[in-house]
Image (spheres, grey):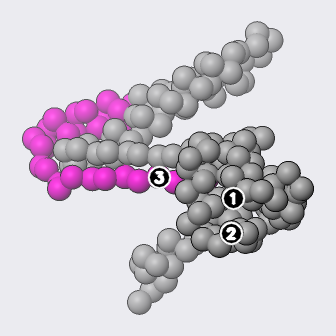
Amino acid sequence: MDTYTDPIYRYNSLLAAVPRPAPNAQLSTPALQQVIDAPSSQADPVGSLAEHIALNSNLSKSQAMAVVKSTSPAAKPDASAVSDAAAAATAISGDVELSDPVMLWPWARCTFAALLVIALGGSGWLAYQLANDSSGNSVSAWAYAALTVTAVVSFVGALVLIMGYKNVTIKGSGGPSSS
């Protein structure tokens, strides 16, 4: 099989091309080991570790406690295992659920997809014109954000119409906190 048509090869190529977010230094193995070895955590290292993870991630204390307890059932947690589990729990993830393809009326799909492609092109053209404006007026970042959102929604809508799906559900979760 040609590598271009091999879905596993294409998926691995895509993963290699996606930039990885910088890991949170407070959730690294050495930082978690310092929390475990701290004199204040000698009474309850699991609780201290869960509190540290909750303070340095988007997890709540109860979620962090579940991560610590699931990776280290012993009294003294393993910093490496907890670090790997915390990184996995705070990673960016997304899920797209597509319904069975439904053939809408071809003229309606083409018409609405064409309108969304025009909106996509218009957003790109307007962003380009705003960026190359030589009058010296500064353009708000909100204008670019609105154009970007319009372009992304138009692109997804056009794809859904072209592919003919009736229902599309897009779910995602945030990544690590910026602290």
**Which comes before the other along the chain, label 2 or label 3?**
2
Q: Which residues are magenta?
A: 89-118
Q: Residue at x 61, y 52 (%)?
A: 64
* Residues at marks 1 and 2, CA–CA distance in whole angstroms: 8 Å
Query: What residue is drawn where x is 42% and y is 76%?
Result: 7
Assign the N terminus to one quadrant of the image.
bottom left
- Reading the image, the residue beneath label 3 is 94
x and y percent of residue 28 in the render? 79, 61
Q: Position of residue 14 (x, y in %)?
A: 56, 66
User: Label 2 near label 1: C-beta < 8 Å?
Assistant: yes
Q: Position of residue 55 (x, y in %)?
A: 72, 42
Label 3: which secondary element: strand
4 up-or-down from 112: above or below: below
Mark 1 and mark 2 lie on one chain; the one further toward the N terminus is: 1
Q: In the image, is 131 to the left or to the right of 99?
A: right
Q: Please name whichever residue, 123 or 24, is drawn nearer the observer in this view of the structure.
A: 24
Q: Image point 55% across, 50% down: which residue?
A: 63
Residue identified by numbered label 1:
46
Q: Is residue 177 magenta?
A: no
- For the residue marked with disc 1, what is the amino acid? Val
Q: Count neighbours of disc 1 (C-alpha within 10 A) and say few if under 14, some if 14 to 19, many if 20 or more.
A: many
Q: Closer to us: mark 3 or mark 1? A: 1
Give the residue number, with chain letter if any, for mark 2.
75
**Residue 27 in sight here:** no
Label 2: few (<14), some or many (≥20) within 10 Å? few
Find residue 62 and report its horizontal and vertical position in percent: 56, 47
> How far is mark 3 from mark 1, CA to CA?
30 Å
**Foreground: disc 2 or disc 3:** 2
Identify which residue is drawn at 51% across, 46% down: 173
